[in-house]
Every structure is written in structure tokens, then in C-alpha cells.
Image (cartoon, rainbow, N blue to C red):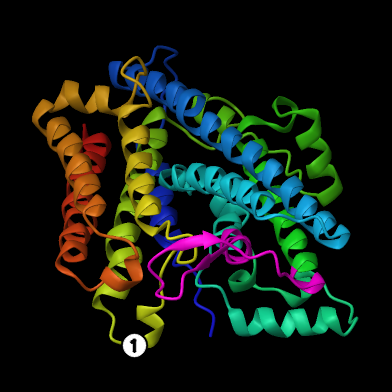
Amino acid sequence: MKFIKYLTIAAVALSMTACSDSNTPDNDDELSTKEQSLQRAAGQYVDHTVLPTYSAMADAAVELQKLCHTIRAKHAAGTLTSNDIATAGDAWRRARKNWELSEAFLFGPANTHNIDPHIDSWPLDKAAMENLLSDIRAGKSWSLENNGGYGLIGFHAVEYLLFELSADENTSMTHSTSYTPEELEYLCAVADDLCQQCVCLEACWAGTDAISDEKQAILEDAELDYGENYGWEMKNARQAGSRFKTFQEVAEEIIQGCIDIADEVGNTKIGRPHMGASEEDKNYIESPYSLNSIEDFVDNVISIRNAYCGTSAANASVSDYVKAQNSALDTRVRQAIDDAIEAISAIPEPFAKHATGDAAEKAMKATGDDLVSVLEEVHTLITRN
């Protein structure tokens, strides 16, 4: 049975609805002190947090795609080595890291175009994959669009074919070179699709004209150019062409994204296998073949830190505004982020074997309860002040 990653679309939709009803800009050209502060934060957030993260992810995904095709070609020629597979695995980890570092901003294009569930649903539907491989082997017509599904594509499908667990499942190793031609046809198709979706995200935030010629060609071939520039809209709130009426709305969107991923990490990614009694819940393990689960979770919380504080002390951020209004609250947010990272880092890998332990319990509370709670206070402050 396939489990689809839980999306907090409803929460984001409610947030956007609430935002649209408040702080409508007046006819005065001068921005309030609050709007000026949040305008600076919006610009730095887009330029120094979102765009570099998506650019690095897309770069790694393009490299990963090429390396998967190299694996297939070398396998056919009889020259494939473990190093070839390990190199592709390294590219997967780089793409994966930047994806997890982006999860505080899963609103906008990642949500609108269903890119989040498309590339990051888990666990892998191995039964469906075997059926698809049988169809490929039998020469049947197939495509990921018609024969796939969210549990059969994305990061975790590629992960499954680049990594494997040791017999005791305590160590992740490079996949053996003994692929079937059908597996590699499938691997390349999934890597192509993953690459296209990652490039699409970068283009939707940066604008298609701002990405490389190579990436533009990828989008054109895949017919995935939505002509969107979400980053511009955030930086140009209050202007014609932007969906944001105020920079307050932008800040609310940023913080709601942080709340959503803190809740998901604590109560779904950690909480579901920790609390659940069913086999479905116990198997709801992110990145199980690469043993990358804990790093995934930590990077999700780092994405919250980057969104709230900026990626460097020089960046204007939402934190600056909160600190000016309530310095004690800002201090508590920063401490809650640090506490969540520390608690998650204390969970040993493999997460599948430690999901029900005390460390997971503490991480679940630190992230899904404590961090969510203090971020909700920030959201309230921004909305009311």
C-alpha cells in the first residue's frame, strides 16, 4: 500500500485567506515602519535563502540525472563500477539536502504545482515498482505519468536504486552493480523526472529568464515552464502583479511555512512511526535506504532557522522585526530552534530501529509542540502588531 506524504495545504490556504482580509494597503505611498522592516526581510529571504537553496538543489539534480544515465550506459557496456554508483549517490545527497533545507517554504509553487508530493512521497511502493519493472521487461508501453504514482517516483525511488542496507540494516551501502536493464531504464526515467521538477521549482521562484540556458532547455523539453516568478511577487508586495497586498502577508506566509514543517517533522515524520501501532505507521520512514532520516529532519529545522533568522547575520529577516517588538519572544524562538536540532540529532540511525525510543519522544515534543507553539506566537505578533 502506498502512503502519500501529508501536506498542510489546508493550513496554508487558511493562512492566505486570513492574510487577504487584513492590512490592506492604503493610498499613502509611504510605508509604515513595520512594512519597511518586513519589506527588507522579504527581499533578503528571497535572494539569500530561497533562491540559493533551489539553485543548488536544481544543480545537483541535473548532475544526478546525468550520472544515472552514465550508470545505465556503463552497465550496458560492462564497465560499471561501484564508484560510478557512489558518485551518483553523492549527487543524490546534495540534491536531497537542499530539498530538505527548502521545506520551510513548501508554500507557493511547491504546493500549487504539486511538486512536493511528486518528488517527496514515501515509503517507496515496492510492489508497484516490481509490477512496473515486469511491464518494462515484457516490452509493454509505459511511462511514469501513466504507470507511476507518488509512491513510485521522486527522491525515494532514486534512493532505492542507488543505496542498499546491510544484512543487519544498520549500515547504508552503495547499491551493487548487478542491476537489470529494466531497473536502469526505470532509474533514468525517475531521475529525469526529478531533475525536471527541481529545475521547475527554481524557475518558478527566480523566473525562467534567470536560470541557465541548460535548465531552460530542460523545462522546454518537459513543457514545465509556468511563466511564474513567485520571488518577484514576494519582493514586490503591494505592487500590481503581486498576489501579496502587504509585506505583512509575506511575513505571515514565511512564518506559516515554518509552522507547517515544524509540525510535520515532529508530529508526522517522527510522530507517526513513534506513536503509530500499525505496520503502515511503523514503515513511514523517510530516507530509509540511505539512512538519511535524521539528517533530513535536522535540515528541515535548519530551513526554519534560515527562513526566520536569515542565512547569515548580515541578512535582514523576520527575526529583526520580532526582536524590535518583543526581544524575549525572538530569543525563545532561536532557543526553540536550537533545542529541536539538538533533540533530533540525539536520535540514532537507523531511525527505523529507534523511532519508538525516548530520544524520538523528546524530539517529537521539542519540534512538534515547543517549536510550533513559539512560532505560532510569532505569527500572532506579526498579524496583530
Q: Is residue 101 visible?
A: yes
Residue 128 position (above or below residue 44): below
Percent across and percent down for residue 224 are 76, 48
Q: Is residue 293 left or right of residue 208?
A: left
- State the residue position of label 1: 278
Q: Residue 194 colored magenta?
A: no
Q: Looking at the rendering, in which quadrant would you find the C terminus?
A: top left
Q: Position of residue 338 (x, y in %)?
A: 20, 40
Q: Secondary structure at mark 1?
A: loop
Above/below status of 66 relative to 328 = below
Please tell me which residue is depicted at 75% across the width and 28% down the height of the picture.
Answer: 212
Task: Locate residue 229 relative to residue 280 in the image: left or right.
Answer: right
Which segment is the magenta one?
154-183
Residue at coordinates 41% horizontally, 69% vertically from top-left? 285
Q: Residue furthest left?
A: 328
Furthest-top residue in this view: 30
Q: Is residue 200 visible?
A: no
Q: Nearer the viewer, residue 137 or 191?
A: 137
Determine if the magenta segment contains residue 156. Answer: yes
* Residue 138 image point, x, y percent: 87, 85
Label 1 amino acid?
Ser
As drawn, 214 above or below 272: above
* Quadrant in the rendering for residue 214: top right
Q: Residue at x 14, y 67 (%)?
A: 358
Q: Does residue 293 appear to the left or right of 184 in the view shown?
A: left
